[in-house]
Image: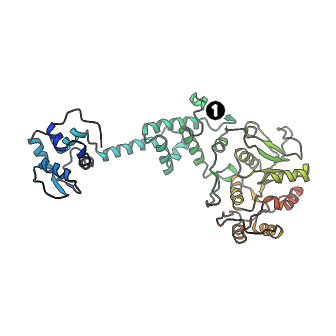
Amino acid sequence: MTKTRNPKSADPRLERLLGGPALAALRLRMRRHFERQDSNSKIGTLQLTKLMPTEHEALALLTGRPTRSTQSVKIDIDQLDATLRNAGIAGSLRQALELLDGPIVNRTMVKNDLLVRWSSVVNAEHLHPALSIWLQTTPATSLLKRLARQNPDTANRLLERASAVLRRLPVKGLTRAQLAANVFGNAHALDNGQPAATLVLAALQHGENDIAPMQDAPEDTVERTSDTRRPAERARDIWARAGILVNELARPALFLNLPVRFESTPLGSPGEPGYLSLRQLLRTSIDWSVANQTVYICENPNIVSIAADRLGSACAPLVCTDGMPSAAQRVLLTQLARAGARLFYHGDFDWAGLHIANYVMRLCGAHPWRFAHDDYMQAIEQAPHSERDLGDSCVQATWDPALTALMQLQGLAIAEEAVASPLLDDLAAGQAPPVPRD
């Protein structure tokens, strides 16, 4: 109920008949009836049910009817309007309610007006194309309304800010703080949680949904399960794909013996593991010498350590995702794929490992490396187990559905380190494993 009183004071008789807190609920019910109509609509009757005794008595006095023991009253609106006018109390029942509690707003008109305003916001032609495409999705509208606190004007301002950022992208190795300062004059305007930053990230991520794997597509669409919830993609990973640095020195990419051309940036001593930060990968032009060469990818840093100890400089090129790839790992793998490397991936034989493998293979077009159902069976035969340790929930291995079925049947997880010996044989030979046929 609107609490704003009409500037014109209500007649004292009207206050006595229908005013006061005791009849507030009754007035609200009658107001809602009028809110569904415009001011020129003809409303024949008004049916009120489940009336309290005080409410029924007030209506009897208002209409001039005798008080009876009933919980339902049907009011002839035209007749009541005439009664109020003849008594000089109000021009109509609608006016009486407005005098007591303020203007009655037509809800349908307000709703339609709001729909028009929101449509104008999300279909504005001046927005960045990536933002316009994202806004056509249902989740986009819901997110925008939440960020704008249901205010179309606020939403329009947020979209303009997000468009201003998107027009500056992509860049090469610019920090997020610098981008924010350049666009808004405030280094913190694109920090995590800022509405404009949220919109930019959503538009960037949506624009990559249909990008091919070699173009650094987002996370694989593996079905979530209770035991293997897919980690939410971190904001810094999305920013990184547009060349924006966030926590640029965090969680660098681990590698061993990655070849570069002579004039390119040296990557440390042969045979010694090295790290590449997101800062280096985005700010330095590394000329990878990997065209048509095999590059192996493992999930766990221990494999890199073992390979360095046993093979040293004789080890084939090796990259470690260190679990689910973060920004630096994602950028490195994508650069290698674009440079023409033939990538092969191995990880843990557990549900999380399959999820990571699905993602990496889609991310950079990698092939499985000793990561099929027959490899799992050989590992089971060689690694003793005392009890099942895989949960009931599972992840489908997109490259080998039989692997998932076999793991469900056996119920045993095999760590990547447990099968290091055959992996080292491949790394020593440096030849690409056979690529499975589709």
Q: Nearer the viewer, residue 213 or 27?
A: 27
Q: Is residue 294 among the parts visible in the rendering?
A: no
In this image, 414 relative to 19: left or right? Answer: right
Residue type marked 1: Ala
Q: Secondary structure at mark 1?
A: helix
Q: Nearer the viewer, residue 381 or 137?
A: 381
> Which residue position is annotated with label 1?
177
Residue 347, compared with residue 273, is above or below; it is: below
Q: Where's the C terminus, which quadrant?
A: bottom right
Q: Residues within 10 Å of mark 1 (few under 14, many from 20)?
A: some
In this image, 286 relative to 164: left or right? Answer: right
Q: Nearer the viewer, residue 168 or 370?
A: 370
Q: Where's the N terminus, which quadrant?
A: top left
The residue positioned farthest toward the left in the image shown: 86
Colour option used: rainbow
Position in image of residue 27 (x %, y %): 23, 46
The residue positioned farthest toward the top in the image shown: 185
Image point (58%, 30%), residue name: 183
Which quadrant holds residue 331?
top right
Position in image of residue 399 (x %, y %): 71, 63
Q: Is residue 263 among the parts visible in the rendering?
A: yes
Position in image of residue 6 (x %, y %): 24, 35
Image point (79%, 66%), residue name: 375
Residue 73, compared with residue 242, is above or below; it is: below
In this image, 270 relative to 235: left or right? Answer: right
